[in-house]
Image: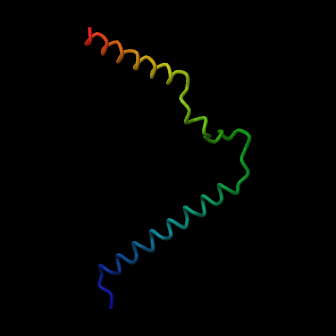
Amino acid sequence: MLTPEEKQRIEDEERQRLEEERYRAQVRRDLLAPTSPSAPPTQTDASTRPTPAKSHIGRNVLLFVLVVIMKRLI
């Protein structure tokens, strides 16, 4: 015989399993559905490359640090 706590735990696990199955089914539907031409482009490796604005910020920070170091040395 199961205790009420064990029954509750089993029901919770079953509920979670059903939610996971629903999520997987939704992902499968999304993957199999034809993409519309207005769909946003997927991220590629280009998104990991720094943009010109980011590279300018990095360069400016580096220059600032070098100026501070040089002033302390002088």
Picture coordinates of residue 68 (x, y %)?
31, 14
Residue pushed farthest front?
73
Specify whether 73 is left or right of 62. left
What's the residue at 36%, 16% (across, down)? 66
Q: Is residue 29 above or below residue 18?
A: above
Picture coordinates of residue 32 (x, y %)?
70, 57
Q: In this view, does 7 lie above or below 64?
A: below
Task: Give the camera-side residue of 39 and 64.
Answer: 64
Report the quarter where the N terminus lies: bottom left
Task: Give the camera-side residue of 1 and 65.
Answer: 65
How many marks are shown on the rendered structure?
0
Image-quadrant location for residue 12? bottom left
What's the residue at 57%, 35% (across, down)? 47
Image-quadrant location for residue 23? bottom right
Picture coordinates of residue 56 (x, y %)?
49, 19
Q: Is residue 9 above or below residue 57?
A: below
Report the quarter where the C terminus lies: top left
Residue pushed farthest bottom?
1
Task: Give the camera-side residue of 65 and 16.
Answer: 65
Picture coordinates of residue 31 (x, y %)?
66, 55
Q: Tell me which colouring the rendered structure shows.
A: rainbow
Image-quadrant location for residue 45? top right
What's the residue at 40%, 15% (across, down)? 63
